[in-house]
Image (tube, helix red, strand yellow):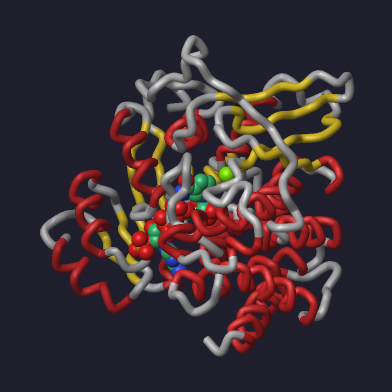
Amino acid sequence: MSNGLARKRIALFGSTGSIGRQALEVIDANSGAFSVEVLTAHSNDELLVKQALHFKPEIVVIGDDKKYPQVKAALSGHPIKVFAGEKALEEVAAMDVYDMMIAAIVGFAGLRPTLRAIENGKAIALANKETLVVAGDIVMQKALECKAPIIPVDSEHSAIFQCLIGETRNRIEKIILTASGGPFLGKKPNFLVNVKRDHALQHPNWSMGAKITIDSATLMNKGLEMIEAKWLFNLQPDQVHVVIHPQSIIHSMIQFEDGSIKAQMGLPDMKLPIQYALSFPRRLPSNFPRYDFRKPNTLSFEEPDTRTFRNLVLATDALNKGGNLPCVLNAANEIAVFAFLRNRIGFLDMTDLVERTMQEMPFIEHPTLEEYFDSDGEARNFAASLIKL
Ligand code: NDP
Ligand code: MG
């Protein structure tokens, strides 16, 4: 696309997920600009095969090796290489068959392949926020050294990124991340204690994968996004603010040192930030529904209720202290969400589990990459042992 002729070659890691499927819709609608060279899934072999037959990538990877025979058989007769297993995700990330990776795997599992892509100087359209939460310092340093641009897909960070265009010499006073508040906005602990998974999975504004939907209900998602923002935009913790904005029309804002505030707005639709990350610095036309100011609308804002949604306090603590604490917070949260989705623990237990794990794990101020991996593993084991998973 850079010379107006060649198509940008895309490697879509996590193609069967919510972001992955929407990214493929964007690519399908802009097939003159993008080609799909790599598709990966964890265990959804049927959808992966369907996608592969439609987009004809060079390579597909199925994370779960037990599914390899099915995928291989279904794609035999097509010039598509099939690989399986965790290691293959990293190996393929290092191959020179693509220009941009869309990092859309969920959770810590996305970190290693994304790092490999960065080490190979690939552009990254980053949906997987956990990568920056866990090891943001190392990831951003490597991106700088290897000249690998990281373009955010997360809607709040895409908003900040878009507001920064033309402002590189201007100091940011603060950024204001907007949060919808999730399905339990205004609720108190006496209500939340009885909340079950199916209720928590109903998000008012966004349709997303299960993990991030629960994170949105507990506000952990906003906590992770605060840490993500710190690394992406090189901010001090006290420059990162959160405001509840239930309509999700303003996707986030920057306040500059003259007091001026820039906001990026639009209807809540992840296809927009996905498309922008793919086409940056250009904007491509789209037929996504438009926000209409002529209709009666209210845009409202309020302080988050951090007494009820204590995950925001825990994440702010991790943001302030840094070191391996965000990594520990993330690991414990992945275990907590996993257990909640299987009805093993209650809604409020998730926060308690994260808090206990953060209190118990040894603090490392400047972890190496290996120490981040170790902290992740130890925090998971500890959190799982607390709830006898
Ligand atoms: P989904 O759960 O819908 O999809 C996750 C994808 O990752 C699937 O393709 C899944 O494969 C794959 N996957 C899961 N576990 C592993 C693993 N251990 N190894 C390799 N691949 C794996 O998640 P979302 O699309 O909702 O989210 C993806 C990322 O984007 C998350 O980090 C999330 O925070 C972020 N994000 C998502 C938004 C959204 O609107 N959904 C908005 C902003 C950020 P399979 O289907 O086979 O299990
Ligand atoms: Mg977001």
Residue drawn at the location 25% of the way across and 64% of the way down: 45
Examine the rendering and report whether any part of residue 15 can be seen.
yes
Q: Looking at this view, is 176 or 372 the one in front?
A: 176
Q: How many marks?
A: 0
Q: Position of residue 235 (x, y in %)?
A: 81, 43
Q: Position of residue 286 (x, y in %)?
A: 38, 22
Q: Quadrant of the N terminus?
A: top left
Residue drawn at the location 47% of the way across and 14% of the way down: 295
Q: Quadrant of ligand 1?
A: bottom left
Q: Quadrant of residue 388?
A: bottom right
Residue drawn at the location 85% of the way across and 28% of the way down: 171
Q: Looking at this view, is 97 or 312 the one in front?
A: 312
Q: Is residue 328 above or below residue 58?
A: below
Examine the rendering and report whether any part of residue 137 can be seen.
no
Looking at the image, residue 40 sits to the left or right of residue 321; the answer is: left
Residue drawn at the location 67% of the way across and 63% of the way down: 134
Q: Quadrant of residue 89?
A: bottom left
The residue positioned farthest toward the left in the image shown? 77
Q: Looking at this view, is 337 or 300 the one in front?
A: 300
The residue positioned farthest toward the front in the image shown? 190
Q: Position of residue 239 (x, y in %)?
A: 83, 40
Looking at the image, residue 32 sits to the left or right of residue 127; the answer is: left
Q: Is residue 235 above or below residue 356?
A: above
Q: Looking at this view, is 386 or 155 the one in front?
A: 386
Q: Quadrant of residue 150?
A: top right
Q: Position of residue 312 (x, y in %)?
A: 72, 55
